Structure formats: C-alpha cells, structure tokens
Image (tube, rainbow, N blue to C red):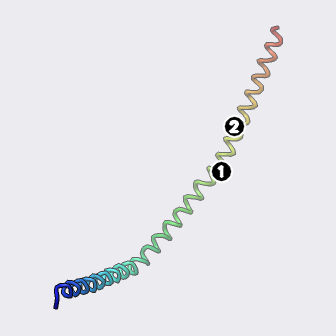
Amino acid sequence: MAVNETIALIRDISVIIAAGVFTLILLAVGFVLMRLYPLTRRTLQSVEQTSSLVHSMVSQPLGLVSGVVELLNRIFAMVNHLRTRKQEVEEDVEE
C-alpha cells in the first residue's frame, strides 16, 4: 500500500466515523425534543391563556381612555375658544 492509499483510507474511515457520531447526536437531540414536547405544549397553552387574559384586562380600559382623552381635548378647545371670544369682546368694549 502506498502512502496516498493509506491517507485516503484514514480519511474515509474518519468521514464514516464522523457521520456515525453526527447521526447519533441527531438521534439523541430528537429523543430529548420528543420527551420535552408535552411539557412545552402545556406551558405554551398556559402562556396563551395568560396573555389573552392580560389583553382583555388592558385593551378594554385603554379603549375607554382614548375616548375620555378626546372628550377632554374637545372641552379644553371649547373653553379656549370661549376665552378668546371673551377677550375679543372685552377689547372691542375698551376701544
């Protein structure tokens, strides 16, 4: 056997061993993920229920706040308009 053939044989054996190790690692990861799936599914369902509860508790009051802010904005605009009209009338009376 020549040196080139020996190097090629070592390379081929290394590739075969690496592929076997990689396959074993993938199988182990797959097994662990399959064992964790029910736990993660329950956790995700709990998180989904909690987030929907928080959404309903937060979004409805925030929707009311925008209406109240709009009402206050209109009231302040009306008061400001009446104040400027009153000042204009007082300026006309003084002249």
Tell me if residue 2 comes above or below residue 64 in the rendering.
below
Mark drawn on residue 6: none
Give the structural element (helix, strand or loop) at label 1. helix
- In the rendered structure, the answer to whether residue 15 lies left or right of residue 41 reads left
Quarter-wise, where is residue 40 in the image? bottom left
Q: Which residue is mark 1?
A: 63
Q: CA distance from mark 2 to mark 1?
A: 15 Å
- Residue situated in front as seen by the camera: 82 or 37: 37
Quarter-wise, where is residue 90 in the image? top right
Tell me if residue 70 comes above or below residue 86 in the rendering.
below
The amino acid type of the residue labelled 2 equals: Leu
The amino acid type of the residue labelled 1 equals: Gly
Q: Quadrant of the N terminus?
A: bottom left
Looking at marks 2 and 1 on the same chain, the residue that comes earlier in the sequence is marked by 1
Q: Residue at 82% across / 17% down in the picture?
A: 89
- In the rendered structure, the answer to whether residue 88 lies left or right of residue 37 reads right
Q: Residues within 10 Å of mark 2 (few under 14, many from 20)?
A: few
Expressed as whole percent of the image width and height from the top left, the position of residue 93 reads 83, 11
Expressed as whole percent of the image width and height from the top left, the position of residue 27 reads 35, 83
Q: Mark 2 and 1 residues: CB-CB less than 8 Å, in contact?
A: no
- In the rendered structure, the answer to whether residue 89 lies left or right of residue 25 reads right
Q: Residue at 17% across / 88% down in the picture?
A: 2
Quarter-wise, where is residue 59 in the image? bottom right
Give the structural element (helix, strand or loop) at label 2. helix
Tell me if residue 74 comes above or below residue 29 in the rendering.
above
Q: Residue at 35% across / 78% down in the picture?
A: 29
Q: Quadrant of the C terminus?
A: top right
Q: Residues within 10 Å of mark 1 (few under 14, many from 20)?
A: few
Q: Residue at 50% across / 71% down in the picture?
A: 45
- Residue situated in front as seen by the camera: 34 or 16: 16
Q: Which residue is mark 2?
A: 72
